[in-house]
Image: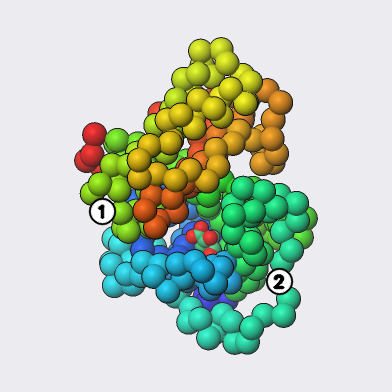
């Protein structure tokens, strides 16, 4: 992989990189398009990273569809599909990991201990292997995107980070590989996440900026049969609580629908309608 990247760069080509865990959907493919807009060659990696799953989490069951991933990557004209073996990425249990710091202690980090150390460790390894000029992440994993930016800044990685808007189905459901676990009833229930984001956004547009009131409004919409809310919070750009919600504040949500844990978010000033809509469900 590194030899390929170096050969391309020696020809003066800029390399864009989209790291994924596979089970590709339109959300990932939009990241590919975005990488292509800013680079001459696009590398896409597929690696289900064991380091970022807790012992009780869904590593074994995480959807894997490499044949489809290969086809979709080829259709989207990915120049290099990088699919490392687990044994090659982690020849031994790693003794050294990236310590993600305080931003990883709340929300997803609190719910999934060790998750962000696992994410940043594998992203750091992938950056060293692929040596991209630019890497594109999705804003659906908002806290992850913030942490990747912090790692790149604090550890001086020579990589530009681009964060792309969330891609949603027409009815508002954010695209996620884990949506594959939802049966039709659960899929309907899962719309409570984007509805709750919209409800908070509407209340904010109506003049409410107190985060406690906004969070209560969102929870009213999220709490429906079949959905177990984990958190709904309004945070600032560095994932810290805000005293007043302004246009840059982000509403972040996590909830379980059946056994499936889903996350979503919206930047208040951009709104759910500011995300990219695809697909046929209205
Ligand atoms: O967002 C993901 O799919 C993963 O967390 C990532 C960035 C590919 C690291 O395994």
Which residue does the numbered mark 2 point to in the structure image? 97
How far is disc 1 from disc 2 in space, using C-alphas? 37 Å
Residue at (38% x, 37% y) in the render: 224
Front residue of this view, candidates 109 and 282: 109
- In the rendered image, residue 58, in percent from the top left (x then y), is placed at 45, 67
Which residue does the numbered mark 1 point to in the structure image? 183
Q: Say which label, 1 or 2, has the lower sequence index.
A: 2
What mark, if any, has residue 255 been given in the picture?
none
- In the rendered image, residue 14, in percent from the top left (x then y), is placed at 55, 59
Residue at (53% x, 53% y) in the render: 136
The answer to whether one can see residue 183 in this image is: yes
The answer to whether one can see residue 37 in this image is: no
Front residue of this view, candidates 46 and 257: 257
Which quadrant holds residue 214? top right
**Where 106 falls versus 4 (above or below)?**
above
In what quadrant of the picture does the C terminus appear? top left
Query: Label 2 CB, ligand 1: below 8 Å?
Result: no
Front residue of this view, candidates 264 and 69: 264
Which quadrant holds residue 125? bottom right
Q: Secondary structure at mark 2?
A: loop
Q: Are marks 1 and 2 in contact (CB under 8 Å)?
A: no
- In the rendered image, residue 160, in percent from the top left (x then y), is placed at 63, 52
Of marks 1 and 2, the one in the foreground: 1
**Where 262 falls versus 100 (above or below)?**
above
Q: Is residue 280 left or right of residue 43?
A: left
How busy is the neighbourhood of tag 2: few (under 14 within 10 Å), some, or many (20 plus)?
A: some
Q: Which residue appears farthest toward the front when viewing the image?
A: 225
Image label count = 2
Residue at (36% x, 53% y) in the render: 258
Residue at (58% x, 22% y) in the render: 213
């Amino acid at each position: 992989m590194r030899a390929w990247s170096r050969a391309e760069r020696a020809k003066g080509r800029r390399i864009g990189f989209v790291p994924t865990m596979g089970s590709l959907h339109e959300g990932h493919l939009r990241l590919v398009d975005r990488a292509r807009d800013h680079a001459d060659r696009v590398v896409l990696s597929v690696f289900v990273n064991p380091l970022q799953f807790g012992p009780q989490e869904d590593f074994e069951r995480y959807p894997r569809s490499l044949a489809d991933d290969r086809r979709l990557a080829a259709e989207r004209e990915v120049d290099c599909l990088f699919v490392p073996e687990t044994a090659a990425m982690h020849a031994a249990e790693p003794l050294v990991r990236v310590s993600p710091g305080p931003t990883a202690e709340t929300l997803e980090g609190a719910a999934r201990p060790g998750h962000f150390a696992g994410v940043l460790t594998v992203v750091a390894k992938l950056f060293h292997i692929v040596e991209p000029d630019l890497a594109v992440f999705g804003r659906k994993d908002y806290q992850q995107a913030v942490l990747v930016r912090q790692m790149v800044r604090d550890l001086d990685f020579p990589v530009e980070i681009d964060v792309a808007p969330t891609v949603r189905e027409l009815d508002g459901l954010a695209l996620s590989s884990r949506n594959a676990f939802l049966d039709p009833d659960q899929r309907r229930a899962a719309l409570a996440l984007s509805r709750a984001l919209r409800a908070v956004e509407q209340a904010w547009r109506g003049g409410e900026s107190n985060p406690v009131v906004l969070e209560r409004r969102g929870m009213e919409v999220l709490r429906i049969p079949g959905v177990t809310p984990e958190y709904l919070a309004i945070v600032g750009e560095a994932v810290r609580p805000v005293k007043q919600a302004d246009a840059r504040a982000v509403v972040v949500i996590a909830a379980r629908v059946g056994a499936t844990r889903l996350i979503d978010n919206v930047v208040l000033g951009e709104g759910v309608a500011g995300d990219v809509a695809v697909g046929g469900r209205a």
